[in-house]
Structure formats: C-alpha cells, structure tokens
Image (cartoon, rainbow, N blue to C red):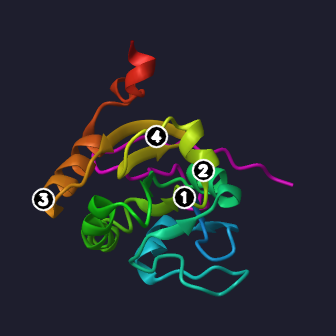
Amino acid sequence: MTTVRRKNRKLSRGSVVVTSMSDKIHVVCGHCDSVVGVDPARLGDAPHCPRCHFALFEGKPIALTTASFERHVARNDLPMVVDFWAPWCAPCRAMAPVYDAAARKFERQLRFGKLNTDDETAPAEKHHVRSLPTLVLFRGGREIARQSGALSATQLSAWLQAALDAPEHDTAPRAARG
C-alpha cells in the first residue's frame, strides 16, 4: 500500500495547491457528510458524491447540525464559512439572500454552511457566538476570521476576499492574538 503525502499551501483566493496529479482535495458532502476526494482539475465539472450521488457543489449553503458541524469545518480542504443564525432574527433573515448569492459566487473557493443556533446550540457555545448573525470562516478546523452583524452583498464579498487574502500568521482568532 502506497501512502501519498499532501502538501497544501494557501493562495490568494483560498485555493489549495496539490503536489501531484494523484492528490485530491477533500470535500465533505452536504447530504451524507462523507469526505470525498476530488481531483482539483475536476472541481468545475460538477462532481458528485460517490456514496449518495448528490452534487457536491449546489450553489447554496449546507444546513449544519451539531453532529455534522465538526466534520464539515475540520475535514474540508476548502475553507468553510459558517453563518450562525436564528429564525427569529430579522437581520439574519435579511442577510439570507446575500449569503445564498455569495455561496453561488464563491462555491469552488469556499464551502458555505448555516447553523440554526436555536436548534443546534453546542457549536455556537463552543465558538463563543454572542450575537446574530455571526459569520465565522474556518480553515483546517481553525477559526481564521469572524464578522458579526448583517452585511450587504458588497460588504460580504469584500470581507470574504480580505479574509482569504490575509497572511496565515495573521489569521488567528482575535482572542488568541491577545
């Protein structure tokens, strides 16, 4: 059995560089939560999950649960943006179409998820979410950026781009930076 070592590094748009053609990018399926290896050259070819046969990229955020949250945040090779929201939150509802549009626009560079904090409280508590909506960008299971409050389409695109362009050493959560 041959072991393939992966060497990933961040590019300006959050993409992943692979060292050989046999390397695959891990993408977590939004339907069955399977971790799927996808050839980077085929990301634009509408890849499907081999387990459940649904498309891996559907141009919309994935509905996350407490059970699926860690797998999606930690196992995706693409950075993951999570919208912590609640149905009673008017700014959350107002920002939903903007977030959905961003999921379509950035879907091959980022994964997008939504976590209803009324139904799934544990991840919000673990990540110290205190106001809604709160967007958290994760890379490799680690928080690299956070934004609280509703954003316009322009503001959201600018925030995502700035977070993806930030040097890795500068992307620790605010609390960790001191």
Q: Secondary structure at mark 2?
A: helix
Q: Are marks 1 and 3 in contact (CB under 8 Å)?
A: no
* C-alpha span from label 3 to label 2: 30 Å
What is the three-letter code of the residue carrying label 4?
Val
What is the three-letter code of the residue carrying label 2?
Thr
Which of marks 2 and 3 precedes in the sequence?
A: 2
Residue 138 visible (yes or no) = yes
Residue wearing tag 2: 121
Q: Secondary structure at mark 3?
A: helix
**Nearer to us: label 4 or label 3:** 4
Magenta segment, principal secondary structure? loop
Which of marks 1 and 4 precedes in the sequence?
A: 1
The residue depicted at 64 percent of the width and 79 percent of the height is 49
* C-alpha span from label 1 to label 3: 28 Å
Tell me where residue 35 sits by quadrant.
bottom right
Q: Secondary structure at mark 1?
A: loop
Q: Are marks 3 and 2 in contact (CB under 8 Å)?
A: no
Checking the image for residue 129, the label placed there is 4
Q: Are marks 2 and 1 in contact (CB under 8 Å)?
A: yes
21 within the magenta span: yes
**Quarter the C terminus occupies:** top left
Q: Whole-percent x and y of residue 5?
A: 66, 44
Q: Whole-percent x and y of residue 83?
A: 41, 56
Residue wearing tag 3: 154
User: Which residue lies most toward the left here?
Assistant: 154
What is the three-letter code of the residue carrying label 1?
Asp
The residue depicted at 64 percent of the width and 50 percent of the height is 70
Which of marks 4 and 2 precedes in the sequence?
A: 2
Q: Nearer the viewer, residue 39 or 51?
A: 51
